Structure formats: structure tokens, C-alpha cells
Image (cartoon, grey):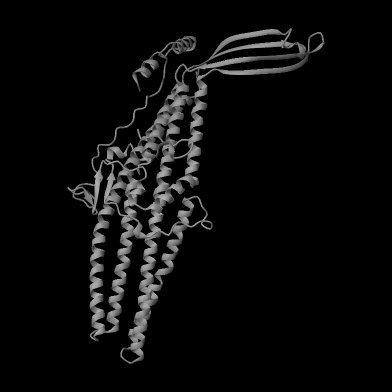
Amino acid sequence: MSENARSCLSRQRPAGLRLAKLGVSLVLSSSGCLVGPDFQRPAPPAVVAYVAPETPGSPSSAGTAGGQRIAIGERIPAQWWSLFHSTRLDELLRAAIASNHTLAAAGATLAQAREAILEARAGLYPRIDLGAGARRGAQGTGAVSNLFSLGPSVSYSLDAFGGTRRQVEQARALAESQQYELAAAYLTLTGNAVTESIAIASTRLEIATVEDLIANDQRNLDLVQRAFDAGRVARTEVLTAQAQLEADRTALPTLRQELSIARHALSILAGKAPGEWSPPEFEIQEFTLPGELPVSLPSQLVRQRPDILAAEALLHADSAAIGVATAQMYPAITLSASLTQQALALADLLRRASRIWSVGSDVETPLAQGGALRAHRRAAIDAYKAQLEIYRQTILQAFGQVADVLSAIEEDSALAAASQRALDIAAASLALQRSSYAAGKTSALQLIVAENTYSQARLAFARVQGQRLQDTAQLLVAVGGGWWGQGDALLAGGGPPAPP
């Protein structure tokens, strides 16, 4: 709690009229009172690295992980997906950002939260009403008459202890949280769109590889069948070739289903029904694996990740709620004034009407409410403590996510190198087997085994290519995705602010 708030509370001990007079004098003074704690942003945790040294995924002394250079502290581009250098991907992301319904809903929710700020601020200004009435009644003599009235009234609740100002502060913090929720929705949208686009390209490559594998199996089966018909091989070799063909065919339905799911998901992200729009048929070759990956420092990440900033804004709102609950424990002072025109005939209301005016003040002081107000304040403090732990846990989860992806990128590099070696060896072995078979030095079954080994190595390498692209995209999203570079261009009606 600030020193101003402490001194304010120390002056608020008297009760009754003395306390009310004190409240009026404080409002009329230039300083005033603002009870409750003044929010202070939590300091970033003293963490300098995402992964412990000498562990998989930690950047080496050369600043590399997974064969890609880790540029610690470098700024992430606003359109982070441009690092993949795919023109069709850029076009798709522009369309998805413009048409995604979840993003539009987040923008509308932000607009609603901003209106709540204006609603809370209205309590800081006088309220002016216009009243009109018509009554008919009997006097003591039995005569029946009409009475018409018309006039304005003004009331003003003095914010003697800052309850209304704390409500405005709370509303602003909640709106700020919605701003970061909008940024999180934007980051989720772009991350999912890039992930599904890469999934389409990767799955299409796998399907093409499996189709080549099946075509090769069919050629091998035909070759063995001719050898069997000529009496040169046993029936078991024909059955082996048939079994291999059918086993490889079983992979196609699953891959085609995965491709359909990725296409449908990307259509929905773009705000289109799967039946009316199809996403581009991405090829794995049109994605360039970034050689340099900008990664924020842990202290920067705390000020960039929208989920962390949203949790911090909610923490601010809970801090302001303590002030609101504290102010409710002190008197509420209201000033009012009214001017009323009264007449017995409606036509005389504005001519020969009698005029009644009044000026007054009301003081409502809580005396005994069964401990409800103190319990409400303690509950607000408990809510703040709970949100503080949620904020800290959100930071830890963010650090863990970055660490996981860095480790994955490191392992992807090792897997890619091993897959490339396996592919090279399988290709060399297949070439030797073909030469031996042509010279009659090897059996058809040995050739089939070499063909399948090569095809499986191709399939494994294709999967590694897609996985490296996916993990790179996940890392760029995990470190914030550069969303703050979009500014108010994110959505019509206002985008998220730059990270504090």
C-alpha cells in the first residue's frame, strides 16, 4: 500500500458526522484519498536461460541448436511466418486474419471491455435527471384536484475514499487483459494456420512417397510372379511380395485422412466452410527452413507473451478490487439538488407554477453488517494472492514451452542427419542389389528388401522435413510471434497495445 493510502486510512478512523466532514474536505482538497494498494508490476524472474547448460536443446557456444542459429535477444518480425519465405503462406495468413471469426469475437469482447471503462468513469461525474409527475387526490375538505410537477435534479456521489476511481482502474485492467487475449487469439490463429499449412505439405509429400513405394511394390510383385511362373523362385517369394504390397497400401488411408483433417482445419481458420473453399496445395519445397531463429531473453518473454501479460492485467484488476472493497467500509457521501415546478393545471405548469427547490447531502456510514464488508475485503485479498500464483505459473509454463521446443529442434537436427545417412546408405545398397540382380547374382527377394528399405528411408526423411518446419513454427509462436508489431492494424476498431 502506498504512503498516501496509509496516511489516508490513518485519517479515516473517526466515525459519524466528523468522518463525513473529513471526507468532504478531502474531496474538495487537491490531494484526496485513494484507499487500497497501488499496483506494482512484478519483477521478471531472475532466469537467464531456458535450458540448463550441457543439456539437449541448450544453445552451444556458437549459439546454435539443431543446426539453426539461435539469435538470442533478436527482435521477431511482426509477420513471423515470413521467415519461411512462402508467398502462398503469406497470402493465406492475410486472408485468415481478415476472416477468422474467433479473432473477430475477441475484438468485439475487447470493445465491450472498453465500454465498461466508460461506464465506470460515469460515476466520477454528476448525474442529471429530469422528472415529471401527475397526481390526483382529495384534500381535507373533500375537494378533488390535480397536481402536476416538472423539474430537473442533480446528484453527485463524492468519491471521498477512491472507490469509484478504483473501479475505473479495475475496468481498465480488465480491458487491458482483453487486449492481450486478442493478441493471444491472433498468435494462436497464425500459429495454427502455419502448422496446418506445413501439415498439408508434409502429408502430401508422405502420400507421394507411399504411392511411389506401392508402385515399386507392384513392380516387384510382377517381377517375382514372372520368375515364379518360369519356375525360378518358390511360392514363398510371391507371397512375401504380395504381403509387402498390401502392408504398404494400409498407410495410404490414414495419410489421406490426415490430409483431409489439415485441409478442413485450415479452411475453418480462414473463416470458410470446408465444402465451399479449399486451401492451397502446399509443397514442402516452398517452405524454407530458417537458418536463424530469433529468441527473446526470458526477461523479455515475460513482457511479450500475451498469455503472461493477460495474467498480469488480471492481477492488476484484482489489486484494484481490494481498493474497491476497502472503500466500501467507509462512508458514502452524496450531494443533491433539485428544482421542481408544480401547478394544479397542466397548462399552468410553465406559467404560474409554484417553484420548489432543495439542496442537500446524504451520508451513509456502514456500522454493523455482520462482518460482511471485512470478509469481502479479505476475499479480494485472497483473490489477488491466487491470481499472483496463476501469473507465476503462467510464466513457468511459458519458459517450459520454449525449453521443450528448443530441445525438439536440437533432436530434429540429429534425427535429420541420421535420416539422411540412412537414406544415402539405402540408396547405395539398392543400386548394388539392382546390379547384382541384373547379373543374376542375387534373388528377387533380396532386391525387394532393398527396394523397401530405400522407400522407408525416403518416407522417414520426408517426415523429418515436416517435423523440423513444425518445431520451428512452434518456437516462433512460443517466444511471442512478434504480435506487437501489428499494432492497431490487427483488427478494425483497435488492436493490442505494444508490450509494456
**Looking at the image, can residue 27 be seen?**
yes
Residue 267 in the image, given as x and y percentages of width and height: 48, 54
Q: Is residue 395 above or below residue 287?
A: above
Q: Is residue 256 above or below residue 304?
A: below
Q: Is residue 136 left or right of residue 408?
A: right
Q: Is residue 17 left or right of residue 441?
A: right
The one nearer the camera, 301 or 356, is 301
The one nearer the camera, 240 or 454, is 454
Report the quarter where the C terminus lies: top left
Report the quarter where the N terminus lies: top left
Q: In this view, does 173 lie to the left or right of 468?
A: right
The one nearer the camera, 215 or 328, is 215
- Rendered residue at 31%/70% (across/down): 456
**Looking at the image, can residue 375 be seen?**
no
Q: Is residue 444 left or right of residue 119?
A: left
- Rendered residue at 33%/47% (across/down): 476
The quarter of the displayed image where residue 240 is located = bottom left
Q: In this view, does 50 lie above or below 126?
A: below
The one nearer the camera, 256 or 150, is 256
Residue 126 in the image, given as x and y percentages of width and height: 54, 17
Residue furthest front as drawn: 87
Residue 237 in the image, given as x and y percentages of width and height: 33, 84
Q: In this view, does 343 lie above or below 432?
A: above
- Rendered residue at 38%/77% (across/down): 245
Residue 263 in the image, given as x and y percentages of width and height: 45, 58
